[in-house]
Amino acid sequence: LSTDLLDEEACGGFEVTPMGVTCLKAMSYSGVVGMSFGIQKRDPWSEHMSARWGAPTKLFDCYGPAKLTGPMAGTAPNGTGPGGCTHVAGPCYQANYQISRVCLGARSYSVGPTRKRLRFEPLLSHLKGRERLSVHLHFDRSGGAWSSLGQLLRHKDAMDTIRTMDILLPFTDVRPTDGPEIRNMVEQERLERRVLMLETLLQTFRIVGSTLEIDRQRWIRERPCAPGLWCSEPTVHLNSAPLEEVYVSFVHHALLAPTTHIGADSADALGSGGAVVDHSENETAAAAVEGTMVNETAVVDGKMVNETWVDEKDAALSGGSGEEG
C-alpha cells in the first residue's frame, strides 16, 4: 500500500481526537449527517460530531444487552442545542440523533426468534438518495466494515455521498456477514484481498491519519508472557507493530485543495496521513503532523510479505452474498 502524504494546507488544518483525525476542510454541515455503525452501548464518535460540529447523527446497531442504556435506548438527552450538554455526565447530544436497531449486511434480512430478532441491511440502502458529499461515516468494532467496503467499491455513486470515514479495520476478523466465499478463504488470501480493497478505496479517498504510530509505540515485542500463558505471534505485523486491526480516518479527495502532495513517492498508506491518533478510551490523542514514514515488510502467519502485498489488480474486491450463520 502506498500513497503520498496529505499536508496540513490541503486539509485546512487537522484536528486529532480519540475518535479520529479530522480534515477541517471537510467539516461543513449544510445538509450533512453522521452515520455510525456498530456502536453497542455508547458512541463517543457521534457525541463528538454533535458537540464539536453540531452535526445530526444516525446510530445503528442490532446487538448489545437486552436492557439498553444511553443513546441506543433513546434515553440520552437529544437535540439540547449549544451548551445543553455542559453539565450532563453521561452521553448527551446537542444536535438531534436517531437510532436504528439495524446491523450491516450484504442484503436485507432478519434472523433469530421474534423477541431477539436481528435485522441486517446493506450500507447502500442507507446512502441511497443522499446528496453528494453529505455523509460522515463511522464503523466501530461490530460495524461490519469489510463487507460494506466491498459494496462501496462497486458503486461509485454511493462512495461519492461520503465526505469522511472513520473506520476500525480488523484485518483478521471474520464475520457471518462476510459471506461464505470470504469465510472459507485461507487467511493469507483473505488478507491480500482486504489490502487490495484499501488500495482501490484510495482512488477516491485520501488517508488523513491512523492509529498505526500509536500502536507501534505501545507494542513491546520482547515483553514476557504472564506465567502459564502461551503468547502467540500476531497474525499480521510489521517488525515494530501488530497490524491485526487499525483505526483509519479518510477524506474524499474532492474536498481537498489542489496542492495535496508533498513529494513522498512511497509511504505506507496506513501511516502516511497527516496525523496519528490514539483511539483508546480516556487517553489524550497524540499528533505527528506529517505522520511517520513506514517502509517495512509485513509478516502474515510467520511468512514475510512485501509491503505492497497484492499485484493482481483484477482480483475480486469482495465475495459472497453473506447472511447470518
Image (cartoon, rainbow, N blue to C red):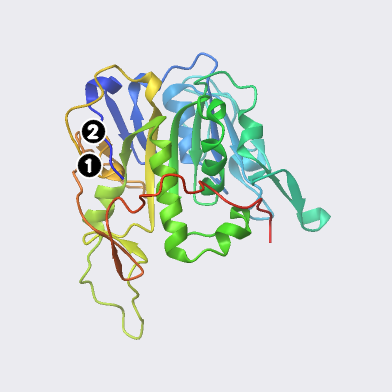
Residue visible at 41% across and 44% down in the picture? 313
User: Depth check: 182 or 281 in front?
Assistant: 182
| Residue occupied by mark 2 | 5
Question: x%, y% of residue 280?
Answer: 36, 50
Pick whichever of labels 2 and 1 is earlier in the sequence.
2
- Say what amino acid the circle numbered 1 marks: Ala
Q: Residue at x 68, y 57 (%)?
A: 324
Q: Is residue 308 above or below residue 252?
A: below
Which element is circle 1 on? loop
Look at the image and tell me whether residue 86 can be seen.
no
Helix, strand or loop at label 2? It is: loop
Residue that carries the numbered disc 1 in the rendered image: 267
Q: Are marks 2 and 1 in contact (CB under 8 Å)?
A: yes
Give the side of residue 219 with respect to residue 82, left or right: left
Instruction: Tell which residue pokes out farthest to the top in this image.
Output: 30
Q: Is residue 107 left or right of residue 92?
A: right
Say the numbered circle drawn on residue 157.
none
Q: Amino acid at mark 2?
A: Leu
Q: Quadrant of residue 163?
A: top left
Which of the image's four quarters has the N terminus?
top left
Say if 32 sits above or below 202 in the image: above
Badge 1, how many Cα within 10 Å: few under 14, some, many 20+?
many
Question: Which residue is found at the position 49% from the left and 46% from the top?
Answer: 140
Q: In this view of the protein, which residue sits in the foreground, 98 or 31?
A: 31
